[in-house]
Image (cartoon, coloured by chain):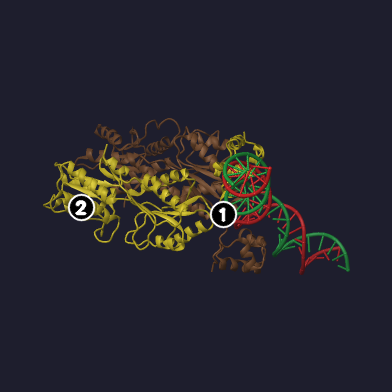
Chain colours: A yellow, B brown, C red, D green
Amino acid sequence: MASHEPATLDSVAARAGVSRQTVSNVLRHPARVADATRERVLAAIRESGYRPSLPARQLATRRAHAIAVRAERQQDGISGLVLDAFYHGLAEAGQDNGLRVVLYAQPADEATELEVIDDLVQTGAADAVVLTATSADDQRPAYLSGSGTTFCAFGRPWGHDDDPHDWVDVDGAVGTGLAVEHLLGLGRRSIAYLGWPGDGAEPSTGSDRRRGWLEAISAAGTGTPLEVHSVNDVAAAETAVASLLSGADAPDAIVCASDTLALGAHRAALAAAGVGIPATVVGFDATPVAAALGLASVAQPIDQAAHLCIDLLTGRFESPDRPARGVLVPPVLRLPT
Amino acid sequence: MASHEPATLDSVAARAGVSRQTVSNVLRHPARVADATRERVLAAIRESGYRPSLPARQLATRRAHAIAVRAERQQDGISGLVLDAFYHGLAEAGQDNGLRVVLYAQPADEATELEVIDDLVQTGAADAVVLTATSADDQRPAYLSGSGTTFCAFGRPWGHDDDPHDWVDVDGAVGTGLAVEHLLGLGRRSIAYLGWPGDGAEPSTGSDRRRGWLEAISAAGTGTPLEVHSVNDVAAAETAVASLLSGADAPDAIVCASDTLALGAHRAALAAAGVGIPATVVGFDATPVAAALGLASVAQPIDQAAHLCIDLLTGRFESPDRPARGVLVPPVLRLPT
DNA sequence: CTCAAATGTTTGAGCGCTCAAACCGTAACC
DNA sequence: GGTTACGGTTTGAGCGCTCAAACATTTGAG
């Protein structure tokens, strides 16, 4: 077993009767070593309980073998908890690729965040960053590609096609499309949309989700599309949907841009229905709240997205100059159990 | 500004006309350096944009200046998202203390998790671990103190007073006590408790929360305490509370052990009330769900807990032999807005 | 039988930092 | 005036690894 002093490359080498470098080769370039030697060295490694020193490796390779990701300051919306799954996915995929995940606390503003990222990279704490919660007016992608920092965004470069970079995103349009199909299958014929303010215009997560709904509705040809918008707040959503449902042409189903909105819509639907059948509500993000309320909801394949981020990053480590790549993953509709 | 080659201790030293070690001293032991020299060195540091190399430091000090924490596989309950806040708190407090936070993916079982932790520590990726979601039958604390790994648990060593270690926890009894007081203030007189199965017996998070309710109720002397238990599931909770409310001595308020339970209780209360005033429900964890439903809920000071974990760990780094310490932080009641 | 090309292994140097010990002036003391 | 003491600074060594080049040893071709 392991002696008290932690084993090093040298101690393992001595035990196996080879040189330091040969032990290193067994670990990093097994093909370079003759079979017999390799066996002997592996045995020595096993017996001594050798664990390579990460700092030493980092120093020699000038690579941190780690990526940084932001720990969000606080979640306001119900949908916040998808991040937990993302962290887990990153850590898992990272482990498989010899990358550790280091967390940095979200600073007060974007400028200091960029400083923090620079620091992480320059001190050799991380080789790259995974950006989350990117938006159209986000300064971070442009800055990072400018400073030559490797990164991958979880979220599309909305309206920034001039500044190409690696990204992974979930195809929101497909998600709302699935929601519409589901509702059509249920016999619903007037399927409204509850989205966020201003999501018709600029490209954004919201406009993407809205588009999926609109296209699916149009394809089905079920009459004039109804829609209403609200800030991401349960009470506001409830109010908005209540007025929609009190109208003459009240819809019999509502596709929502988030589970927060869906919760509001659900409450409004229940209230408006009275003794009748309430409008069917479909949410977005498949949070436990939707499950708890028995609502169908679009589930983002967060774990897969995290793995893809790692794939893009490792790919870029290998060939730093390959063109930027974007991956769109399709969500699935999670039905209530 | 910074030249192209990243600055090192040596390059800064040359620029300031001093030796390598003096620059190091300016950074780590400012008192050892004469004022004039210090100014000169600081200027050189600023001009060259010098950032100390973490790996080099780690190698020389044999300290990782990092702590590890587990990224949970997935959250089932509504309450899951408190972890996000915990991660942020750790990262923030860590940053203030020169500690980075590295994430490891929760493995399939506890045994491999212990391996992962050992690896992290032995490779020099982390100096210590913060354990989350500790339970009574948790093997990890005993193993880690056995192997001499520094750690701090977020969660009390329920029923393991024989194996003392550093921990931080939220005082659940105070939380449910606050809930009771709040309800008494509202004029409620029959305050029931909705808890988890088997939380009366063994010491646990559940029994702790129940105790707080029971003591507050007893102190108020408002009659026979009513209680009902359910697994942490909205539907199950709803059923359980429904039967409680249909009884002759139905309570006019319910204190819940979690927001998941509270959501179920809330739905049952609304249904049971008909045209009357529904029983007031108070949740636990102050998740967005409780806020969304307008329920009061006990908020765990997660951020504070995270900071305390870091405090305990840094304290232990300084004096490894000081006796184990446990800190209990009081929660607050978050009222609906 | 010689020389060149593979193949396998070792050597030397260096990554950028911190520790401990050595060094050097100058002030303090008898 | 010589010794001691001390604040301030430098030197040497080493943390454990990887790179590139050097070095053996074997093999194949001419």
Q: Specify the label residue B54 is tagged with.
A: 1
Is residue A266 visible in the rendered image? The answer is no
Residue at mark 2: chain: A
Residue shown at 32%/44% (left/top)? Answer: A287
Measured as percent of width and height from the top left, residue B210 is found at 39, 36
Residue at numbered disc 2: A215
**Quadrant of residue B22 in the image?**
bottom right
Describe residue B88's horizontal placement relative to residue A187 as left or right.
right
Is residue B115 visible in the rendered image? The answer is yes
Q: Are marks 2 and 1 on the same chain?
A: no
Q: Amino acid at mark 1?
A: Leu
Total number of numbered discs in the rendering: 2
Marks 2/1: CA–CA distance: 52 Å
Measured as percent of width and height from the top left, residue B45 is found at 58, 65
Element carrying mark 1 = helix
Q: Amino acid at mark 2?
A: Glu
